[in-house]
Amino acid sequence: MDGGSFRPPSLFNNIDDEQYYVQETVDKGKGRADEIELDGDWSDSSSDTDTPLLNCYLHIPSTEPGNHPPDPLGDGNHQLQMPMHEAATIAQSDQSITDDVEDTSSEESLYESVHSDVLATPARTYATGADDPPADDQDLAQSLPGLHRILDLITEQGSGGLVDKIIISQNSLKAFVNTVSPGAYASMTKVNFKMLDQSTVKPVGIYGSKAEIVRFLLRLRAVDDNIATHLLSEPTATETHPTLRPGLYILHTTTAELDGSEQLYVIYWPEQNTWDDSAPSQVRRNRVAFMRYLTRMCDQIFALVSSEHAGRMVWNDVGEGDQDEDDCMDEDDEGDRIIRCVVQRTTEQEESVQVREGFKISSEHISQVAPSERGEERPVKPFLLSGETAQGFVTMQHQPPRRVVETFKGRSFNDIQLRDYLMSDSLDISETLDDREVGILVHVGLTNRFPQECANWEHQSTAIQERYKKVFDDKLRRTKEELARVAESLTNTVRNAVIDNVVALYPSIDKQALMYTGADTEDPSALSFSQIIDAFPDVRRTFQSNFQSCCVISDPEFRNIKDRLCLLADFASRTKGLDSWIRDPILRAVFRGGFQEAERVAKSLSVDSASIRKFLRDLGRIMTGSVSPQTSSYSIEGVLRQSRQASLKVTDSEFFRMAAEKKSFQRTIQLAQLVESARQRLKLYLEHTVPRVVVKIASSIKEIQEVDCHARIKAECSSQEDQERRTYRLHLIQNVNNLSTQVQCRHTLRIVSVEEEKKVWLSYKAYKVWGQRETEEDPVTRYTVHPMSVTEEDKHNLQLDPSSIPLPRFRFQYPFQLSLGHTILRAQLLEGERLLLIVADRVGDISVYLETLTAMQGAIQRERYKHLKREKIGQDFHVAFDESKRMLGVVSSDKLLHIFVHDDARGFQAQGSPINLSPWYGDGVLIHHACFICGSEEILLVDSQAQARVFSMVTMQFRPAVLNLPQVPIGVHCTPDGSCILVVQSREPELAVTAYHWGSFGSTEGIALNIPDLFIGEPLVVTSLIKRTAVHLLRLNLPARSCQSHVLDITRRHTEFMFRERVNRSSSSEKAHETAHNCLIDCHSEVWTRFPVWAAVQRETISSASLKNQKSIVFVTHRDFDMFAPHFSQMIHSFERTTKKPTGNVLKSIKVSAVSFDVFVQELCDSATWNASQYRAGEWIANFLCLIPIHIAVTKDNRFIPLKDGVYSPSLERELLGAGVNRIVDNISFGWYESLFQSYMATKPVRVVSSMGEQSVGKSYALNHLVDTSFAGSAMRTTEGVWMSVTPTEKELIVALDFEGVHSIERSAQEDTLLVLFNTAISNLVLFRNNFALSRDITGLFQSFQSSATVLDPKENPSLFQSTLVIIIKDVVEADKVEIGREFSLKFEKIVQDEQEANFITRLHAGRLNIIPWPVIESKDFYKLFTKVKKCLDQQPVTHPSAGEFLHEMKTLMAKLKANDWGAMSQTMASHRAQLLLSMLPNALIYGLQETEPEPELLRNIDTDSPIQSPDTPSQFFLSAGGFSQSDTREQALTALRKSWDQHETRQHLADNEWADSLSQYLEQIINLRIDHVHEWLTQNLSRFQTGHASIEELRRTFENATVDLRSNIQLCRLQCSSCQLLCIQNRFHDGPHNCRTDHVCIHQCDFCKESTGESRACSMIGGHAGKHICVVNAHLCGKPCKFTGKFGCLDLCTKVTEHLDEHLCAALVHGCGEPCDLRGIKLADGSIYACPGTCRIPSSPLLCYMSAMQAALF
């Protein structure tokens, strides 16, 4: 960088450089506070047009000595103040909160709810010690529109104590992503980065003093004065208010640049004291981690420095003598590396105990609950847990009996689960269940539990079915006989109705002429026709349809007369104004020959006469409104044709009415004769037609009656049968319900509905159940343990200085329950979160538990305890427990001492026989207290005579010394270090505590401890923190809701030694250069030191399409503008010189400058365009997500435990107990990396590099500098389990795995083996670092490797164990590297010789091993070797061709390790893939999609996320295995498919066979597209698996069966429609009658009318009829009744030429026989006799009905 340039970088395109100059008004010296004078007004005086917001100011008092007020902030910032009117302006500027923020902030992040579903419930704690997590309304992030928390700082329990952890805030990230690109973030594992790449962002980083950040937010109008006040104040133990948690935030403004880029502020909100150079180490580590992420996310950084911080900056001297300065710095650096320690002998003192104030922790749980609030008999108080090295308290709550209800809403159960519930629970089966549902329950489990009741019900159900089948047959037979009996009267009724309608239509017809003349017997009981219609509504439609033959007179002679007379009347009325010499000839022509004759005459007449022209002109005016004869299109022929069209519309009945009304027809003889002739033809026609219509209507009514009666009888019988079945069903349900409640059950199963799931791919039966399961819980007492946790920082301080005061926290909660009447006698918290619990039950017997806090509830439920009978130990007994020996002492009332020792495998075991203490005590003397002396096998006993004596279990004797106490004490406690005993005595109104040293036991009067405010009844606990010598006395202060401690500084008489760091003699000179807030600048150097500047493997997430600008850092301050750049340059120089790290040109290219706040605000906030780096949003987000490591696995209790989304969940662990590998795979998730592996980077190959080795040998540091990761960036000093990070490069993904150290005291050998097995199986390069100076036993060091070599066989897992093992020997000087390399080679050679084929190098690493003696850190060659390791990584074969494939393989491997499945990996992966594809197969076949909810997802290659490139149709098919209703849904799907065919409307324009063939071809074509598409989808997703695997073959068989089903569901019936002669196009397996899916009417025009007159008249025949299209048969053809009238298929009227001589036949090609079907007397399986009710429909013998013929053809 340019060290001499003090001007800021050109960040903004529209700003002149001159505006950056700020006139200096302060001294630029060393920045001493007493030289600074600040003006209270911070507004920009140079601008007269600033908005009122710029008038807000920070009131910062003078910093001169004596005038400096107390700093209300932890980091030196001052209170923000502003004028009230300006504050109101800001407050009113924007009070709205975006919906996205409201919605997402209310949801608890997965990381924030790490333990929400487990026994241990965390509470986020702060420096005040309060244990209450901030509620939603306590999070200020929700109050800031557009502010999204991206990285959050939380506290978790590590193996060494509480640690801070930086995690991704998922809900807030979701809100931000969906703000940038709506819908791109569906879930943590489904982020559409490609959609995000369509948007661009320009991020700018902001960090610095809190007051300045708030000032900046005020200027942006992002906060108001109220929020600003909360931001700048810290909550206290007694007062809380909304706060903003430390973390990394993105402020998304509404500003967008002209190119659409989103302007983003990435803000680092610091912890308290973050910018103090003396900040605690934990805060410093968090600061470095956050700055690492901030500087990698943004190229342009702004550091906001407050006046307080700027005034205490200490600048490096830059000028002459640089070389001398470097030499001095070298010497200082070397001196700094020497930590001088000394072992000192402490001053010899007499025995003493000094008391001083300790810590005080507040908690809302430390309070007394009044009985009225909870319903308890007495007040409920929390109480302290005993514990030598662990602390905590317990709260209790009496829980009354309650009923827990688990609701089922269609929950799926397999038959085993449902059977278990039916067999064990009290049952409350709903009486609304039908027989099918009851049958399911009987079959699944009721028949086993209630065999007699179920057998009776099944027998009764069968009997009812048979009886009502017989009843139905009898009623149906009688009904048919009755219908046959009334058939004649029905015909008479129909005849009368037809004649009545005919007379009404044609009043001139004589009714008597149409009446039946044969023998007729009146049936008085016969129904009238109106009554028949009321009884059978379908009769009306049938009557109207058949009566049409009477409405249209088809007699040819009649039609000729009608046509002539109608044409004559209409033409005469239209041409009244026409001259008679023209009009009359045409009328006569109409009378003689009709329209054709009249048209011929009209054409022959001259049209030139004036009369015609005038007529046409008048006619045109009338018709068109035009007066111009030239525009008239009318002519005599045209008028004639119009009359012709009008006459054709006149109905037959209207014709007779018109003839009767027109006088001209009556006056003119010829016309009257024609009218009379028409009447005669009508009479003859009706005499012939009416009987035929009566027969057809009567026949149809009979059929309707039969069908309706059949349905009614069936409904009536079914109703009666259902009623009787219901009676027996209710009897069964009531019996089952009653019998199940006779046995006391805790659970009651209520079933409202149940159905069987029909899915062919399920290998077991499954049922959906609606209802609920109620559990009766007995009254219990709920206890909650609140253990005390200490931070790692406090632990470190206590180890260095035992006198320091820690600040513990109550973070977790562990509940357990005891039955009512059980009492806790003793509760002692042990190391390792274990609890000793001694409980007395209702009869006084004792139960002793010793379990972990999480397992305590399970131990109570399973009754895993040591049982002590009260009758043997007596009523007055006492208990003591020694933690170091795990020794339990029970002193019974008869003075017997029982000793029990705890073993993890066997629990408490008695040690020898009870010890009789009676010989040492007289009669009447009782023992009141017992207490072990810590660390020894001696126990202190205090008797009723106030004597304290020590009994040794080694010598079985009392010590000679006796301690005589003034009174029987309330309690006795041994200090954890075993130095003395504390005796608590009552001295009204307070307690007195006296200490007695063991060294002078019985010879002194003790030391009275001055502890104020110890009231009687207040229990005390003596414990220690970290070291047993750091003794604290704890008590609960209920009014203050706090836990207080008093530190006991105990000294013994003997001389003690202490190891401590010696104070540097030059400390006085160093204090002169002590800095306060230089870390605002030096934090960058801390990041460079801890993380790589230029790693061997460079990240290449950002593509060339992004527009990157030069990196820059702008310090926003009020002074010393010219000091920042030189200081920064000097810092880079010092860093490069001391660390020897490769930096390339990265650091020197950073442009550094300083500006005033006003200039910064004006240019950053008011500028429309930023000259900042521009990124694709997806790439930018993916880049910083890849920086965050995720925790993927831990080992615990000799088990390998994969984590879901980086979180350990005990509830999930419980759910997966006994689960198979496939289910475990489905529950493993890698959080934000899922979308990267599955979609965004799915096609890139993957190389895996891992780091392993001993503890604290720099494994994470080395991995970071090799592949540019951020391990340990979560502020955890020691890695636990396995962590993963990803480094994207241009060609591949580098996955880095960081493992915890092997051979640690926290891990067993089996846990080490599991970690090694996982590492060596999945990795391509394994870096094993070890400390050669301390670990020369190579065989022992690699024992876990050798043990892993025998677990999974590499031959059966060819895709695994393909790594190269690289042994890195740390801190080897150049002179020793050859010798050390040879030594290691010889040791490995011995391992190979000893193990031969079973050696781990061959089995786990394919025989490849490299040894690298690594130089000492900060040497010149330390970082050079990373490049060589990268080359070694590049040379490794690619075993993971795609990220998706790698994801599947690693999840499967982790699941196998968890399930202890040591089978072939390929078989397991194939099984899981087959199961996954099988679950998606129905959607694939039906929709052509993998998923339909929540968003449609195309068929893809799961490994590469690439869509399957195969043509397909958007059509939706029906699959019987899809769980749908078979008939309705199948027909609906088939109808939709038919309509999707572009030739669908061409039906009846082609021969129906030809049209149906084309439709079938179309359906076959699209079904083949879908099947081929799904087949290709299966092929691509199974291509990497070996054929022949059972699961894959099962999948293929299921696919083949499903395709058969799919094809069968599109096959057409193609038999004749029951209503016309078109083909049935329903599915071949359809229910009900055949249907062509049309209106059954021919769509064509009459052929005869077209040929003769050119008239278009609709064909009146049914659809698909044979022969020509005819409007009215007897108008053009014979029209006589067909000889087969009434037979199936007959078209009724003869279609032969008129006056033919042979028999009358219609156009039907085939006529049904019509005789009753011969299919009778068939005995069915149920014993009933079947007789077909149909008639024969084929002209062949023997007589078979049509359905029977079809059955014979098919089967």
Image (cartoon, rainbow, N blue to C red):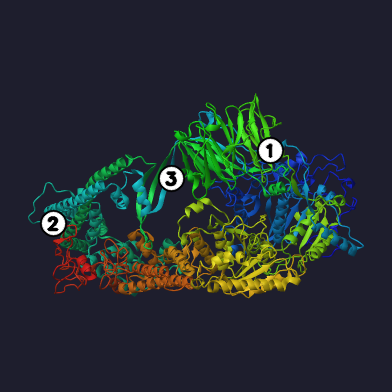
Instruction: Report if residue 1363 is visible in the image.
Output: no
Q: Between disc 1 and disc 3, whose residue precedes?
A: 3
User: Dot 2, crowdedness within 10 Å: few (<14), some or many (≥20)?
Assistant: few
Number of the front mark, 1 or 3? 1
Tell me the SS state at disc 3.
strand
| In the rendered image, the vertical position of residue 983 relative to residue 1389, given as above or below | above
Task: Tell me which residue sits at (55%, 64%) in the image.
Answer: 1318
Q: Is residue 909 left or right of residue 13?
A: left
Decide: marks 2, 3 in contact (CB < 8 A)?
no
Nearest to the observer: residue 1446 or residue 1344: 1344
Question: Which three-letter amino acid code belongs to the residue tagged 1?
Answer: Gly
Q: Residue furthest left?
A: 519
Q: Is residue 1606 left or right of residue 35?
A: left
Mark sitting on residue 1541: none
Nearest to the observer: residue 709 or residue 1491: 1491
Question: Which three-letter amino acid code belongs to the residue tagged 3?
Answer: Glu
The residue labelled by disc 1 is 999
Nearest to the observer: residue 1519 or residue 1460: 1460
Q: Residue furthest right?
A: 320
Across and down, in percent, residue 1711 comes to: 19, 69
Distance Cα–Cα, label 1 vs label 3 = 62 Å
User: Dot 1, crowdedness within 10 Å: few (<14), some or many (≥20)?
Assistant: few
Q: Between disc 2 and disc 1, whose residue precedes?
A: 2
Figure quadrant of the C terminus:
bottom left
| In the rendered image, the vertical position of residue 1554 relative to residue 1237, given as above or below | below
The residue labelled by disc 3 is 406
Q: On the image, which quarter does residue 565 sit in? A: bottom left
Across and down, in percent, residue 85 comes to: 76, 39
Mark sitting on residue 513: 2
| In the rendered image, the vertical position of residue 754 relative to residue 383, given as above or below | below
